[in-house]
Amino acid sequence: MKKVSSPIVSRLPQYYHCVEELYQSNCVKVSSATLSDMLGFTASQIRQDFATFGGFGLQGYGYHVKTLRYEIREILGLNNRKTAILVGCGNLGQALLKNFDFEACGFFLLSAFDSDPEKIGSQVGPVHIMDVERLDQYMAAEKPAMAVLTVPRSVAPDMAEKLADLGVSAIWNFVGCDLHLEDRDVVVEQVSFADSLLTLSYRLSEKENDAE
Amino acid sequence: MKKVSSPIVSRLPQYYHCVEELYQSNCVKVSSATLSDMLGFTASQIRQDFATFGGFGLQGYGYHVKTLRYEIREILGLNNRKTAILVGCGNLGQALLKNFDFEACGFFLLSAFDSDPEKIGSQVGPVHIMDVERLDQYMAAEKPAMAVLTVPRSVAPDMAEKLADLGVSAIWNFVGCDLHLEDRDVVVEQVSFADSLLTLSYRLSEKENDAE
């Protein structure tokens, strides 16, 4: 598989949602023109992006939806389910446990951890909350690939380093600060609420300036 | 102000964090080369991006941090504080109320709304939760510019339409589904947990393929 540029990577989830929608509506084939209408990218951009991954279209036919779906799922790593744990069961952690569909994104959530005795042992969403003191032992036995990090900011860098030491391959970082794991062999994907709201603020100012 | 391409817009929050850090450490001037080291973009890219906004650098001197910060804050709309409300005080809404710094992103949070009698009247973070039945009246009086949408998915499109009818200029959408407000004059910025986790899944697969 070739190295893919980050703009293409950022379009992958949108391709996936779109093709999943076509697949769920029993659509058999789709042209790059139709994909362009659905996604707002140019047809040529879409053909170019797909070509980067080996191009699964046929000239004059378009794309076979089932194949396209399989290939995009393969690229995204969704055909092999990976295991995950969640660390930090405050409001945000609990929101994810209760409402977020990990399986649709290729992950099976094994367990969740917290240090609060009132939370330990209780069931939230599909899992029971375990004592974070048991994390070392649990990681050694279950070897989850990914950890969702929803601990308070003050303990986040230490917990991230501990998780790296215990062998996670990836951290989904909700903490809103840098985890300083650049030198570790760990994929870190950050959900930055602040960057999103700054973007909204920009777009709102732009709109107000246009209106003036 | 010129129209700015979306790749530049996506880099704006990173520019802001970086310049804010320089400003907080009392740094007076900075070159595009230093900004490049801090951000990982090329110096030429940075000069080009800043030129789009009117270019506030001086040949051979670099950028005056205080001016740069002011200009980036101006572009992001942070020099004029806007008002916001939050609708839906479940776990995710409460996590934002308790922990998220709205003011750092240019917003002042006025109030929060929910339909649960047990929540109405209680204080969460800096605000009291109000009865969502009072939303119409409140919006007419306070005219908040933005609404944070953290309601359950089942009621999200209706609530989004109601908020548009009541005059919000922007919605920060945490619901994880499309709000279908394309025909309305409302800026919608979506925080998509799924897209973030799909990207993580991609990067994790890529890493595993590289290791093979």
Image (cartoon, coloured by chain):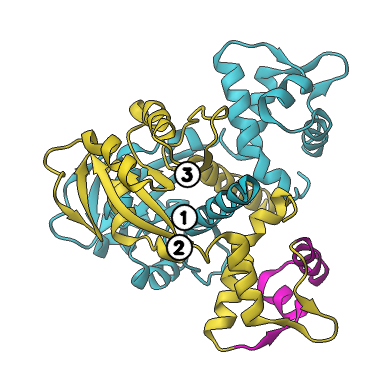
Chain colours: A cyan, B yellow
Q: Secondary structure at mark 2?
A: loop
Amino acid at pointer 2: Gly
Which span of residues is magenta-colored?
B27-52
Q: Residue furthest right?
A: A59
Q: Secondary structure at mark 1?
A: helix
Find out whether the residues at labels 1 and 3 contact each other: C-beta distance under 8 Å.
Answer: no
Is residue A26 depicted above or below A97 in this figure?
above
Image quarter for residue B60?
Answer: bottom right
Is residue B17 depicted above or below A5 in this figure?
below
Q: Is residue A188 left or right of residue B61?
A: left
x%, y% of residue B113? 26, 43
Q: Secondary structure at mark 3?
A: helix
Is residue A103 depicted above or below B209 in this figure?
above
Is residue B82 depicted above or below A126 in this figure?
below
Residue displayed at 33% across by 48% down: B142
Q: Quadrant of the N terminus of chain A?
A: top right
Amino acid at pointer 1: Phe
Residue B163 falls inside the magenta stretch? no
Q: Residues under labels 2 and 3: Cα distance? A: 14 Å
Instruction: Please state which of residues B207 and B12 is positioned toward the viewer in this rendering.
Output: B12
Residue displayed at 53% across by 46% down: B196
Residue displayed at 23% across by 54% down: A130
x%, y% of residue B176? 45, 36
Find out whether the residues at labels 2 and 1 contact each other: C-beta distance under 8 Å.
Answer: yes
